[in-house]
Amino acid sequence: MSTDKNRATAAAILPLVGGPDNITSIAHCMTRLRISLRDRSPVQDEALRALPAVLGVVEDGTSYQIVLGPGAVARVTPEFEALVEEARAAAPAAPATRTVTADDLAAQGAALKEAQKARNATPFKLFLRRIANIFVPLIPALIGCGIIAGLNGLLTNLGWVPAVVPALAAIASGFMSLIAVFVGYNTAKEFGGTPILGGAVAAIIVFPGVAKIDAFGLELKPGQGGVLGALAAALLAVYVEKWCRRWVPEALDVLITPTLTVLISGLVTLFGLMYLAGEASAAIGTFADWLLASGGAFAGLVLGGLFLPLVMLGLHQALIPIHTTLIEQDGYTVLLPILAMAGAGQVGAAIAVYYRLPRNGSLRATIRSALPAGFLGIGEPLIYGVSLPLGRPFVTACIGGAAGGAFVGLFHQLGVAFGSTAIGPSGWALFPLLDGRSSAGITLAIYAGGLLVGYLVGFVATYFFGFTRQMLADLDTDPGPDPTTATDAPPKERVPA
C-alpha cells in the first residue's frame, strides 16, 4: 500500500512538470525531489503546491525542487524515475523525417534559454551545490551511527550491559573510521570521474601505514586531513584521470589510466594534501571553538538568525563538510544545536500566525498539519506554506531563531560546550544525538531552554510585529469551511448552522 501511495504521488507530479520528455535529470536530497527541466513554461506551480504530498516548490536557477519531506522523498524519487523511464520506453519511435513546426522551434528556443540560464548561474553557488551532493548521501549513515554512539555512551555511563558496549562502539565507529573513502567515491562520481578510483585514492588517508612515511620531515597520522583531504584527493584524481583519457592510447587505457590516476594522486596526497587538509581541518575546529567561547551569545544570534534564509535558498547543505569535520575531530558539531534554533523561531512564528488569523481556516489547517514536522526540525512545510509567502512572519521567525541561538551560544561562552554527534535531525529529534563536556542533564536542559526561547520570541515577535493592519484585513477572512475552527471566530462572525 505504501508503494502504491508513493507511485501515485510520483504519477501526480510527472504531468505537472511537463511530462517525461521535459526532464533531463532526477535527484533528491533529504527533503526535496530535484529535477532539471528542458522547458520551464509547462510546469504548473500552483497545481504542484495543491498536491497533498507536496510541501512546497523551490527554484534556485540550477534545478526545480519539489519539497516532499524526509522519508517520503527517498520513496517517491525511485517511483518517479521508474515512471519517467517507463514512459520513455513506451514512446513510439520518431519517424526518420518530419516537418519542423513553429511549436518545435519554440520548444527548442525555450530549452536553449534554460540552458543559458543554467550557464549563467553563480559559479560559487553551483560549486556549493556539488559539494553538498557529495555529503547528502552520507547523512543516513551519520544519523544511524550517531544515535548508536549516543546509546553506547549512555550504557557506558550507567554501567549497564558491559559486554554490549564494545560491539556498539564498533558499529558506531566503523563508518566514521572509513568516511574518507565514501567521500572520495562520491566526489569522483559528482565531478565526472570513476567513483572507485576516487575511493581508492581517499583510502590512502585512513591507511595505518601512512604513519611510517616521512613526508619532508612532517609527521603523518592515519586520518590526517579527514573528509577535506579525501575531497581534495578525489578531486585531483578526477582531473588526472581526465587528462589520461585524452592522451593515453585507447588500447592501453585500461592499464595506464587507473595506474597513473592512483599513483600521481596518491603521491600528491601523501606529500602535500594530507598535511594541508589536516591544517585546514584543525583551523576549522579551532575557529568554531574560539567563536563560541569568545563571542558565544553574539555568534549564536547571528547563526540562528541567518539559518532560515540559507534553508530557503537550499544552501544550508554547504555546511555539511564543516559539520562532518567537527564530528571527526571532537565527536560532535557545536554548530548544529545553534542552527537548530532557527526551526524553533519558525514554530513560534507559525503558532502566532495561527492565533492572529482566527477566521482563516485554510491557513490554520496548513499550520496544524505542518507543526508536528516543525517541532521535529523539518522547516520546509512552515517556510513555504506559511511564513515566507506572508513575508513579515518570515522575518520575525528569524528573530526567534536568533534569540534561541544567542541563548545556546551564551552557555558555550560560559564553558558549557556541547553539540550533535550526527547531522540531519533538528528540533526535538536532536535530543538523542546531543553530547558535550558537561553532564547529559545539563546539556539537554540548555538545548531545551534554547528551543523554548526560540518558540517564545518567535511567537511574540510575530504576534505583535508580524502583520500590518492591511495584512490582517486581507488575511483574517474565511476563504473556505474549516469546521474545527468555527468556535474560534467572534460570535457575530459565526456562520449560522
Image (cartoon, rainbow, N blue to C red):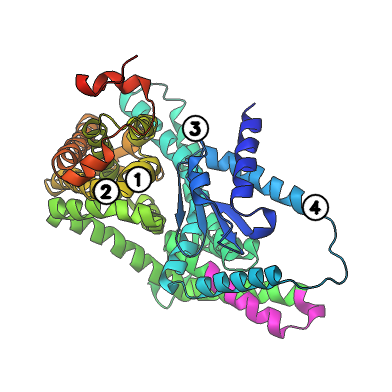
Amino acid type shown at disc 2: Phe
Query: For mark 1, what is the residue?
Result: 383
Amino acid type shown at disc 4: Ala
If you read the primary sequence from the N terminus, does the residue marked by circle 1 or circle 4 appear first?
4
Frontmost residue, 189 versus 418:
189
Q: Residue 156: percent from the left, percent from the top?
A: 35, 29
Mark linked to residue 394: 2
Secondary structure beneath disc 2? helix
Of the 4 image quadrants, the one containing the C terminus is top left
Give me the C-alpha separation between circle 2 and circle 1: 7 Å
Secondary structure beneath disc 1? helix
Frontmost residue, 179 versus 34:
34
Judge from the rendering whether residue 3 lies leftward or rightward of residue 423; answer left or right: right
If you read the primary sequence from the N terminus, does the residue marked by circle 2 or circle 1 appear first?
1
Mark linked to residue 477: none
Amino acid type shown at disc 1: Ile
Q: Is residue 474 magenta?
A: no
The residue at 19%/58% (across/down) is: 290
Give me the C-alpha separation between circle 2 and circle 4: 45 Å
Judge from the rendering whether residue 415 lies leftward or rightward of residue 336; answer left or right: left
Mark linked to residue 89: 4
Q: Main secondary structure of the magenta part?
A: helix
Q: Residue 432: percent from the left, percent from the top?
A: 35, 32
Q: Residue 313: percent from the left, percent from the top?
A: 38, 57
Contact, mark 2 vs mark 1 (Cβ under 8 Å) = yes
Q: Which residues are magenta?
A: 234-253
Query: For mark 3, what is the residue?
Result: 167
Give me the C-alpha separation between circle 1 and circle 4: 38 Å
